[in-house]
Image (spheres, coloured by chain):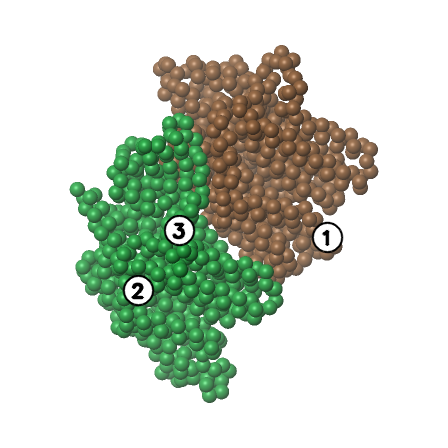
Chain colours: A brown, B green
Amino acid sequence: MDTSAWSSFNAGDMLRLAPELLLLAGFALILLLDLFLPTARARQVHNGLALAVIAVAAGLLLPQFGMKEPLLFFGGSYRIDPFSSVMKLLLLGGTGLILLLSRGVTERERITAAGEYHALLLSASLGALVMVSSTDLITLYIGLETLSLSSSVLAGIRRRDRKANEGAFKLFLQGGIASAIILYGMSLLYGISGSTRLDGIRESIRTVDPGFIPLLYAAAILLLVGIGVKLAAAPFHDGAIAASEGASPPIAAFHAVIGRGAGIALLLRLFYGGFYGQPVPEGALAEGASLLAQDAFQGILVLAVLSTAVGNLLALRQTNGRRLLAYAGVAGTGCLLLPAGISFSTVSLTSLAELVYAFTAYLLMMLGSYAGLMIVERLSGNSELSGFSGLYYRSPGTAAALLLVLLSLAGLPVTAGFFSKLFLLFGAVQLRMYGIALFMAVASVLALVYVFRLIRQMFLRGEWEASPNANPNDTIPWTLKAVLWGCAITGVLLGLFPQMLLGPITNIFKRAMDFF
Amino acid sequence: MWDKLPLLSLLLASPLLGVLFLAVAPKGNGRLLQRMGMATSFLPLLFAGTAYVHYQGVVGTLQLAERYPWIRIPLERELLGASTYTLTFDYHLAADGLSLPLVFLTALVFAMASLASRQIKKRWKLFYIQLLLLETAVIGLLLARDLALFLLFLAFALVPMYFLVGIWGGADREKAASRFLVTAGMGVALIATAFLILIGTAGFTVEESTMAFRYSGDLDTIRMNLFTNPAAYVNYVDNPFTMTTGMRVSLFGLLVAGFGLLLPIVPFHRAAVRVQAEAASCISMIHSAVWMTMGAYGLLRFAFVLFPEQAKAAASSLAVLGLIGFLYGALVALAQRELRSFLAYANVSQMSLVLLGLTTFSTEGWTGAVLLLVSHGLISALLFLLIGSWGERAGSTELVRLAGLGSAYPFLTGVLLFASFAFAGLPGLAGFPGQLLIFIGIAKSHRGVAAAAVIGILLLAAVMLRTIQGLLFQKPREEHRGQGAGGGSRGDAALWEAVPIIVLTTLILLVGIYPGIVSQHVEKTIAGFTAHIQSSVEKGGD
């Protein structure tokens, strides 16, 4: 990284970076306010403030969609391009919904540190935004650590809860190891290329000495494993499952949606930056280098297939709503990794758009499901599957909305989940990867089974007993219902007219193909 | 007047109108909900009847077509040098001689089932909403001319069917619903994969003049590219859109397996039998008359017509599968002691006969298969309706419990006898012309199979007769003495039973005496199919 570039930072650039800076300011402000405000008041203020910060940041993001050229900052280590802007908007939107879900959670779960809770949510999403926009190993790593440290702490923020502590500790430990592995991979890349910037790495790998190719493979594998842990892709899902079981649901949703979205972006930046489409260098081992790109992306596909299979299979056996959703998230990771692993080719240039559509669908179905789960937990006092039973009788509206969200999770029409699956499979088919398409289609039958196990409880089972933990005076905040219905209706709209989202996105990407 | 109206869209949307009304109706008022549900299920019947009358069978082409752009996704075009490059799916509905009779059957059976839904004693609101949603999905997939639209309706149909089986059935209903879901879901997954591969290869077209590149889900485009357009990329070797012979074989296999899971072809029949044995009888009516029919429809329209060479090559093995299913279904039915599962196995047997008809690749065989689908739909719907009525009266559908009840309910008994004869293919009733044509077809194509299948037909007749004989001629059990018209707990058929019974009986007679009412629509279209297959197989042979 060239520090002299920092001096050229001016007011115009400040405006471009306003969303990130605003998150940082919000983070500091909440921490400061927390010192002065009485606890009872602070909970309300913090949530409102954090929501306002997210909303304004998202608003500041909008002008970036009109840009013709990608913008580079800090000597090319930070980059604003269509991909980053779209992903940032989705991540901010997701964080906003999670903040809505968090309303009242701090009182209910007796989280004393309401200030930290909201401040850390902001810092974690700041980390996610940085990851999406970075084109330098060091900024990427800083973004990654900001996100994962914040979310580890968030997982354990219910200090008195044993499960939360266990989950947070596992997450922290595994995350730490993963960071070390990623750093190792990054340093190999740096060692080979002599540059921390992705374009520099790309340039030097293009003309790399064939002797380094084994090292490049090692770097790719290390990065893949490390990011796999961060994404909670199978077989590295263990810590994340424990964390999402112990953490309060909005935090689990944050891990599942924001963490994964940013992780996928990191994977794309690194792999497209470092390995994609390396033209064959002149020399004896030319074949090896061209295979490198292919093999690296094959590695992503392996991870995708494993995640889908393991996530769906293990979700079948769950009897607890939180664990079930956590495993469904692992299976969802597979769906996000698939378009990431299908690299560009002449016939399929839209895998980025497919990825964005799939991520939107994933975001809607996961946040909707978590909202539904939170409502059910309040109604029945536990998160077991039996807690869902008779939901249709108790609260028909909630049951109907949750049904739509769950259908999306199962990939059935008329929801965003259906077209998300369809487009992913079509992406694979375009590249003639018929085996993977068939595998993904058959695996989604497993999703049908566990999703309908929930639906069966909601609609087919009548009897319902409130568990002793249930508090009859527990009212359901309107925000939960709003998020649930919002996700359900948006999902159905995207399921009827997918081009509402896909059309604009492909247009945006068309204008600036240079993702690198 | 009908020329101006989008008839098929009205047909498709009319059940949804009912859903809308039902959704706002108060939940507790069962009578109101029942009436609304019944009334709205006649709306699609009206439209389907109009379309049926309106269709010109002599022409045999696609008619009443409606087409609007639905999904247009621009793909990245710069590297290909294309002016436009899009993924296009259309809202494209049209009827031909294959789909229209089945659509009418669907609308009719749904209307009759909703009349018969008096047996439904709980949760009427959800019931009628799901029933009408299922009707929309089935009509939609029968009319869809775009693969993506078909998939949308097909996958959607799983949801209401799951609810209908799982909520209002016998003791094991939840298990039956789950099994149905897995089996049909697997079918949908296989079909979806095959369709996407078709769209990605045969659906790709380039307009040379404008350099417009396009993936299309349109069935006609795909068919044209596969067969009549030698310049299509799918027919060239070594490009991203090639379809190799091996691929054709696997795609045909995927489609046969996928639709075979719905039909069902015999090793996959367990889920269907469970559903029909466990579901409420109005749902069993729908499953046997509509859902199974849909499997046969898909098999014919997609697997056989799009992959004629592969189908022809596999004809003998499929014929053997059909024969096995035909005999197996009849034999297992013979062993049943309970009416619902008895009829379920008999249905499996009939569907295998349809499969046999499809393997003949002759106009007779295929027309016969479609005729049999229609007549089987009518007859099995009537039988399930009757079984439901018997079950209500005797408190059980076990054959032992029904013994000797015949004299107590003369009307119901008479109709049961009539329906059983029709099922067995008695001349003059609806089952006959279809079976006859299928046998003519098989006798031409697979002689050995035909000989064996004759045994099956005899077996089926024997099975039907043996089953009702106990009902009629055995001595009534003690507890049933004095039941029936004389002063029993329930009278002979009530009005809400009598109306669908009479309507279905009339139609069975009508189709039996004058099969032309169906075949006039079917024949021309089927002749078009067989001619197409003939020509493409010959072309492939060169």
Within 10 Å of the Cα at label 1, are there few (<14), some (14-19), or many (20+) other Cα atoms?
few
Does A177 appear above or below B527? above
According to the image, label 3 marks what residue?
Answer: B66
Which of the two marks, 1 or 3, is nearer to us in this view?
3
Does A153 appear above or below B402? above
Residue situated in front as seen by the camera: B338 or A391: A391
Residue B231 in which image quadrant: top left
Q: Are marks 1 and 3 in contact (CB under 8 Å)?
A: no
Residue A45 in which image quadrant: top right
Which of the two marks, 1 or 2, is nearer to us in this view?
2
Give the x, y percent position of residue B163: 51, 59
Which of the two marks, 3 or 2, is nearer to us in this view?
3
Within 10 Å of the Cα at label 3, are there few (<14), some (14-19), or many (20+) other Cα atoms?
some
Q: Amino acid at mark 2?
A: Val
Give the x, y percent position of residue A161: 71, 42
Q: Amino acid at mark 1?
A: Asp
Which chain contains the residue that carries disc 2? B
Q: Residue furthest left?
A: B542
Can marks 1 and 3 be said to lie on one chain? no
Which chain contains the residue that carries disc 1? A
Within 10 Å of the Cα at label 2, are there few (<14), some (14-19), or many (20+) other Cα atoms?
many
According to the image, label 1 marks what residue?
Answer: A474
Q: Residue at x 21, y 63 (%)?
A: B440
Mark nearer the N terminus (3 vs 2)? 3
Q: Residue at x 31, y 33 (%)?
A: B208
Tell me the CA gap for discs 1 and 3: 52 Å
According to the image, label 2 marks what residue?
Answer: B518
Tell me the CA gap for discs 1 and 2: 62 Å
